[in-house]
Image (spheres, rainbow, N blue to C red):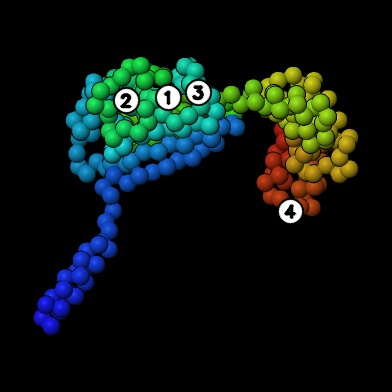
């Protein structure tokens, strides 16, 4: 009986210990960001300062660093892209760095399943290298971080931050090529929406304004009752083309539609534009 009770007690303690969980000192993080038409995913671990000196000490200078903690940090891009001007195929790459006081090397490394820095660094696996200057920040970033900032339709910056140090590497994605291809394909048998979308893209991308106007007017002629947000874009296009009277007329129509829809944002935008364009 005593043996049975001992066994049951032992099993109970074993079961309890198996259920214990605790937070990881360098928790994992994943960031997914759309840039243009490309999906960019960052995966990394986030060590904390915990009173330690980071740059030049915990992170030694002039040495390949895993850029984070635990397994190597990675960047995955769904389309071909350019990293600091170097063409890179779509895929997932390890992100390594070699920090120094006044200059960092940031590497994209083809082998992306390493634990920390590779034991044998192979320069042939480096698909792109960026040389950037570190910036000192006023804010202290207590936990290591990676992020995507300065986002445009055609690119962004990969930012790496810890303590009061930040580096940023520009990369670009082929948004314009993809959009132009889709426009050409769509306009072989276009709908009003195709014309409208193409016109707005051309306007925002600074392309042929006359072509943009032609498409916009074709789109609006095919829509029974243009929505206030469509009229808003038409007004901006007219203004950009220097056709102020037409811009004012479109903005007034957009304002009326926005009021009917009780859309405060569009009401304000239209009122501000009408004031800017000297409407009476």
Tell me which residue sits at (71%, 28%) in the image: 182
**Do residues under tags 2 and 4 come within 8 Å of each other at their CB atoms?**
no
Q: Give me the C-alpha separation between circle 1 and circle 3.
A: 17 Å
Q: Give me the C-alpha separation between circle 4 and circle 3.
A: 47 Å
- Position of residue 153 in the picture relative to residue 108 (left or right): right
Q: Secondary structure at mark 3?
A: loop
Q: Quadrant of the N terminus?
A: bottom left
Q: Which mark's residue is nearer the viewer, 1 or 3?
A: 3
Q: Quadrant of residue 269?
A: top right
Mark 2 or 4, nearer chain start = 2
Q: Mark 4 sits on what residue?
A: 262
Residue 212 is situated, as x and y percent measured from the top left of the image, at 77, 25
Tell me which residue sits at (15%, 78%) in the image: 4
Q: Give me the C-alpha separation between circle 2 and circle 1.
A: 11 Å
Q: Mark 1 sits on what residue?
A: 169
Residue 80 is situated, as x and y percent measured from the top left of the image, at 53, 24
Mark 4 or 1, nearer chain start = 1
Q: Secondary structure at mark 2?
A: strand
- Density class for disc 4 (Cα within 10 Å; few <14, some 14-19, many ≥20) is few
Q: Which mark is residue 97?
A: 2
Q: Quadrant of residue 102?
A: top left
Q: Mark 3 sits on what residue?
A: 89
């Amino acid at each position: 009986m005593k043996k049975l009770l001992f066994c049951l007690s032992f099993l109970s303690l074993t079961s309890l210990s198996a259920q214990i969980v605790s937070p990881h000192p360098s928790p994992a993080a994943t960031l997914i960001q759309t840039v243009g038409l490309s999906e960019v995913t960052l995966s990394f671990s986030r060590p904390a300062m915990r009173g330690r000196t980071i740059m030049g000490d915990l992170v030694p200078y002039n040495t390949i660093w895993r850029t984070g903690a635990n397994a190597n940090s990675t960047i995955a891009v769904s389309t071909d892209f350019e990293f600091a001007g170097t063409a890179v195929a779509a895929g997932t790459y390890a992100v390594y760095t070699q920090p120094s006081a006044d200059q960092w090397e940031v590497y994209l490394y083809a082998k992306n399943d390493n634990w920390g820095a590779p034991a044998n660094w192979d320069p042939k696996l480096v698909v792109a290298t960026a040389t950037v200057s570190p910036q000192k920040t006023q804010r202290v970033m207590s936990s290591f971080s990676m992020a995507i900032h300065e986002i445009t339709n055609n690119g962004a910056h990969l930012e790496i931050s810890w303590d009061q140090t930040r580096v940023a590497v520009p990369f670009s994605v082929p948004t314009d090529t993809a959009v132009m291809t889709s426009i050409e394909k769509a306009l072989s048998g276009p709908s009003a929406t195709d014309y409208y979308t193409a016109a707005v893209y051309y306007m925002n991308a600074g392309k042929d304004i006359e072509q943009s106007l032609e498409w916009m007017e074709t789109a609006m002629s095919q829509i029974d009752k243009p929505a206030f947000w469509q009229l808003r874009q038409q007004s901006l296009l007219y203004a950009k083309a220097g056709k102020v009277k037409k811009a004012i007329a479109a903005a007034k129509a957009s304002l009326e539609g926005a009021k009917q829809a009780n859309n405060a944002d569009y009401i304000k935008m239209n009122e501000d534009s009408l004031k800017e364009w000297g409407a009476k």
